Image (spheres, rainbow, N blue to C red):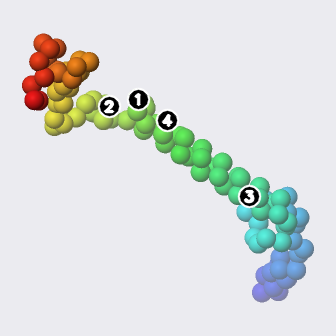
Amino acid sequence: MGLWDTLTFFVSTTVEPSWHKTWPFGPGLDEGFLSVFLKGVFIAAILGGMAWLLRWLFGPGGPLREKEFDEPDPEAPVDASPKPLSRNGDADDDGHDRNH
């Protein structure tokens, strides 16, 4: 047990390395504002990269996306688009206003 006690003593009494040796996973806010800000930017970049990768893989036309998601919904009702109104307000363009 003497060797184990000696090793644990040296490990526990070593001086912590400077922030750039433990960055981005060093503990606390004692390293200064710039280090804390850069940690946030680093984490945002990692999360943004993951979001972009998932969007590319499974987004519209992605290589891992199932092809049935890119097809139109067969259960969706077909919307019959109405005829555009003419200048006088009737849809059949015969000159008679059928609303009055």
Identify the amino acid type marked 4: Trp
- On the image, the x and y values in percent for residue 7 come to 83, 78
Mark nearer the N terminus (2 vs 4)? 4
Which sits in the foreground, 46 or 5? 46
Mark nearer the N terminus (1 vs 2)? 1
Q: Is residue 15 above or below residue 33?
A: below
Residue shown at 12% from the left, 12% from the top: 94
Q: Is residue 25 above or below residue 62?
A: below
Query: Which residue is denoted by mark 1 in the rendering?
Result: 61
Q: Residues within 10 Å of mark 3 (few under 14, many from 20)?
A: some
Can you tell which mark lies on residue 56? 4
Q: Secondary structure at mark 1?
A: loop
Identify the amino acid type marked 1: Gly
Q: Quadrant of residue 78?
A: top left
Looking at the image, residue 98 sits to the left or right of residue 18; the answer is left
Of the 4 image quadrants, the one containing the N terminus is bottom right
Measured Cα–Cα span from mark 1 to mark 2: 7 Å
Mark nearer the N terminus (2 vs 3)? 3
Query: Which residue is denoted by mark 3 in the rendering?
Result: 39
Q: Quick check: marks 2 and 4 in contact, CB under 8 Å?
A: no
- On the image, the x and y values in percent for residue 97 come to 13, 23
Query: Which residue is denoted by mark 2 in the rendering?
Result: 70
Q: Quick check: marks 1 and 2 in contact, CB under 8 Å?
A: yes
Q: Secondary structure at mark 3?
A: helix
Q: Residues within 10 Å of mark 1 (few under 14, many from 20)?
A: few
